Image: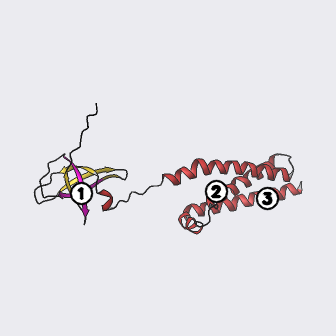
Amino acid sequence: MEVKFVVASIYLTVMIVAGCVTIIYLLFSEIFDGVFEGIPFIDPAVILSFLTIGSAAGFLLEKFTSLSTLFTFILASMISAGISALIYFFLLVPIRSAESSLAYTEESLCGQVGRVIVPIPVDGFGEVVIESVNGIITKRATGFDNEAIDYDEEVLIIEAKEGTIYVKKYEAIQFNLK
């Protein structure tokens, strides 16, 4: 019975240490991700979850079953590997692939269609709203050929520089295919 107590204590210690390191990792994950970026198959989040879940399963199996210590270790490792794989494939991979930046460049606005929300006078400035994957953007606008553009007109962004976009009235081409 003494061996089971020592092994259970080891599992409990590993679980507490891995849990504390997991909390530290959550706070400083950007730094750790940069350190392990060059090593392809090492992901600290998965390793820490494996250790925490494995030690918790091992502790519970040692404490509440009469299985041998070796079988408990193997079973806890299998449980931990399964749950860690589920966490990786169904939680971490989708979250990391869903990351997108809300940043945009002035060059990326060229060719997009917007709508005038403040009329653009001749040789003056108005305002255009652009809906994109980055959200809704409003920009100061002027006519590309210094023409006036009324409120609620659709415009095509021709050029963007120094915080101002140069626009022309947008005329969608309708094709009648019969």
The mark nearer the N terminus, 3 or 2, is 3
Of the 4 image quadrants, the one containing the C terminus is top left
Give, as a three-letter code, the residue at label 2: Val
Specify whether residue 13 is in view: yes
Q: Which residue is situated farthest in the top direction here?
A: 178
The mark nearer the N terminus, 2 or 1, is 2
Q: Which residue is mark 1?
A: 158
Query: Which residue lies at the image location 57% right of the left edge and 60% below the top edge?
Result: 26
Query: Which residue lies at the image location 58% right of the left edge and 69% below the top edge?
Result: 35
Give the distance between the C-alpha atoms of the residues marked 3 and 2, in whole angstroms: 23 Å
Give, as a three-letter code, the residue at label 3: Ser
Q: Which residue is situated farthest in the left direction here?
A: 122
**What is the span of residues highlighted in magenta in the rendered image?**
137-162
Is the C-beta separation of discs 1 and 3 under 8 Å? no
Q: Does residue 125 appear left or right of residue 13 in this picture?
A: left
The mark nearer the N terminus, 1 or 3, is 3
Residue 156, magenta (yes or no): yes
